[in-house]
Amino acid sequence: QVQLVESGGGLVQTGGSLRLSCASSGRTFSPYAMGWFRQAPGKEREFVAGISSTGVGTYYADSEKGRFAISRDNAKNTVYLQMNNLKPEDTAVYYCARARFSSLVRRASDFEYWGQGTQVTVSS
């Protein structure tokens, strides 16, 4: 059983930064791509960023390009999401997820395991 535990969420002002972390239990981390999604109240869950198993490949939703950076440390079984220049519309619960594959994917159905989420609130 794979468990993903997110941390690092909180309340921040517009223009501020947060770094989310997602720690994976078990030994099945490095062979798989990872991703971050978010879900705002009343909205569907949406893709934020993804990273390949090696960390060489990354992919971002258009609204996050240039502001967010995804990275991973396979030695620590952890994936990160650095979020800069945060906006009120970034307010959501952020989820990390482990893909079924090693290559980059972005559809929620391509991810097999999910964390419980961490709340990010950006005040105006």
Image: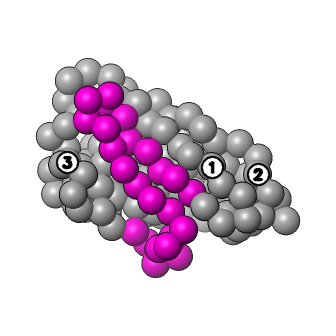
> Residue under circle 1?
18
Q: Cα distance, mark 2 to mark 1? A: 8 Å
Residue toward you, 16 or 47: 16
At a point 71% along the width and 42% down the height, the residue shown is 10
Q: Are marks 2 and 1 in contact (CB under 8 Å)?
A: yes
At a point 26% along the width and 21% down the height, the residue shown is 26
Which type of secondary structure does the marked residue at label 2 adopt?
strand
| 10 Å crowding of disc 1: few (<14), some (14-19), many (20+) | some
Furthest-right residue in view? Answer: 124
On screen, residue 56 above or below 75: below
Quadrant location of the N terminus?
A: top left
Does residue 39 belong to the magenta stretch? no
In the picture, residue 84 is in which quadrant? bottom right
Query: Bounds of the magenta span?
Result: 60-83
On screen, residue 6 above or below 50: above
Q: As drawn, is 117 to the left or to the right of 54?
A: right
Which numbered disc, 3 or 1, marks the residue that appears first in the sequence?
Answer: 1
From the top left corner, tell me how far across and down residue 71 is, in percent: 37, 50
Amino acid type indicated by mark 2: Val
Q: As drawn, is 52 to the left or to the right of 45?
A: left
Amino acid type indicated by mark 3: Ser
Amino acid type indicated by mark 1: Leu
Residue 51 can be seen, yes or no = yes
Residue 111 can be seen, yes or no = no
